[in-house]
Image: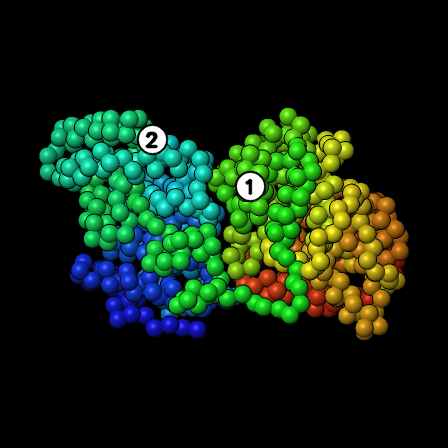
Amino acid sequence: MQFEAGPLLSKIATPEDLRKLPKSDLPQVCDELRQFIIDNVSVNGGHFGASLGVTELTVALHYVFNTPDDQLVWDVGHQAYGHKILTGRRENFHTNRLMGGISGFPKRSESTYDTFGVGHSSTSISAALGMAVASGYKKESHRQHIAVIGDGSMTAGMAFEAMNHAGDIPNNMLIILNDNCMAIDPNVGALKEYLTDITTSHTYNKVKDDVWNLLGKMSKFGKTAQEIVSKIENGLKATLLKQSNLFESLNLRYFGPIDGHDIDNLTTVLNDLKDIPGPKILHCITTKGKGYSLAEKDQTLWHAPGKFDKTTGEIHKKTYDDPQPPKYQEVFGHTLLELAEKNPKIMGITPAMPSGSSLNIMMRAMPNRAFDVGIAEQHAVTFSAGLATQGLTVFCNIYSSFMQRGYDQVVHDVCLQKLPVIFCLDRAGLAGADGPTHHGLLDLAFMRCVPNMIVTAPRNEQELRNIMYTASLDSFKSHEKAITIRYPRGEGVMPAWRTTLEEIEIGKGVQLMEGDEIAVLSIGHIGNEAIAACEKARELGLKPALFDMRFVKPLDEELLHRVFKQFKTIITVEDAAIQGGFGSAIAEFMVDHCYTAKIIRLGIADEIVEHGEQKELYALCGIDANGILAKIQTNTIPVPAKNNPKALVS
């Protein structure tokens, strides 16, 4: 559904059009932009509160700076809807996050105004610094470089690494710290307290305006006066805050805090900062969800609420006559608390995703045993390793695509030391509308190659509960291995999911259907599509055998020997990258044991999969029930054994 933009917004096709307006029109532009976002997200879904919180900032940045020649880098991109609307995508905004439509995040291939592709946090300062240094090298001194980063993203080590470097080399970069005390959930850590101190220091805020006025006139007094003013400014900040300014200590000129919703002052300040050379940071105070009262009051719920009635605020949820399966993350959260109530050694860790992962269930009940460590996946892994050295049973829950950021720590700090950390990888496989930055397609490949790592994927909620229970037992520690448990975003398949907890044997698969023509081997939740495909095949008179391997590492070799002795055609199915994943593991087994068979590997090809609903993407990649059935149908004629030492792998 498309919405009409307001009278001013409808005339803005590019930021150049925006810059033609008098400054007095900007408040109305902000109102119209905010309403356009509310209209569209209420009907089409998507991220909500973040973009409302930076509406004035977005307008001010494009009004003051000559984008795209001046390069604007958004961190994460949840807040970039206003940016997209102002940069030529207003007419297509109703396609946001839909298959074939525009991306929900900045994307270089989509627009020259999207200077850097983002979806994971804390990259903006590094990217903008690279752009700034490149401009300096090419003697493009006129270009400005702006990184917009939230206080939540500032909790990641990468942001500090970038600031440390920025303060040490010549560059012309402006960092906008969008401080709303929120990521998706409320921020945690000492940095949050530090920013709060700056924000609430009455003495500092009373004096800083005079300092600001003086700084804004620096260029009129020459280099000596600039140095004097800089020393005065630094001394005032350090004294009034009763501590050294964190950003100034990194050689970043600190300005603020200022009201991020005062469009008039924002444009004035940004214009002043254009004339101040060197790396600098502007601290803006904003409210996530600004302009929609319900989103301001419950910022976590309204981060991405789905479709809703914009008038009443009622979030639309599907209603069913029968009980429905829960989401996998909910099963994880409730099961972890259930286990922790019986086992005092259990601890829970997540990097800034307590509500998304459902670790918040344990955090509420046992705040001293469940930790949100901020956007810091590397720290989350090594912190978990430290806990494990003391005999604790640690569940470290990280989204699959976020786990990539902590891979070095998995190898060196966990597996080389044979520590039994339990990695629960949420959002594994095709993540849906969030697209390629959030698809968790690589974990099977990169986890199974690490020594001292067990890799498993439950087919349903009962399997998830049982493997979590198994990994929580003291007897599991005797393996001296870590374990990766991967599961997808969204609903499972069992409405009655609160099953009795049972220990399962590590590395053992199960046969789900008997057959004598072709064998289908699946791993994880996508096995439910394989079940549906095999059931349809039976209706057509075909007899595929179906096996749920359950473990990618270690493989059930006893079962595989039986499969390769009986079947000459084998289909593997995985919701993961086909290179190096489950199908590759099966092919390796075949080669290592000198079997000859035809293997058809179904999974995600070596290409970027764009955004869309999960079911749409399953079909696109040929791993839905129809895609699997098609492969069964075209490969049911047994392939005669030949004296060929090489197997056919397609």
State whether residue 81 appears in this view: yes
Q: Give the left or right position of residue 58, taking residue 552 as reference.
A: left
Residue 404 appears at what percent x and percent y? 56, 42
Amino acid type of the residue that numbered disc 1 sits on in the rendered structure: Met
Residue at label 1? 363
Q: Against 418, is 362 above or below? A: below
Q: Of residues 338 and 649, which is closer to you in this image?
A: 338
Residue 630 appears at what percent x and percent y? 73, 68
Amino acid type of the residue that numbered disc 2 sits on in the rendered structure: Leu
Q: Of residues 245 and 606, which is closer to you in this image?
A: 245
Q: Give the left or right position of residue 196, taking residue 327 as reference.
A: left
Residue at left offset 18%, top offset 39%: 209
| Disc ID at residue 246 | 2
Question: Judging from the image, what secondary structure is the residue with disc 2 in?
Answer: helix
Residue at left offset 68%, top offset 41%: 339
User: Could you tell me if the residues under marks 1 and 2 are in contact, i.e. CB atoms within 8 Å?
Assistant: no
Estimate how packed mark 2 is, as few (under 14), some (14 to 19) or many (20 or more) residues with alpha carbons within 10 Å.
some
User: Quadrant location of residue 411?
Assistant: top right
Quadrant holding the C terminus: bottom right
Colour pattern of the rendering: rainbow
Estimate how packed mark 1 is, as few (under 14), some (14 to 19) or many (20 or more) residues with alpha carbons within 10 Å.
many
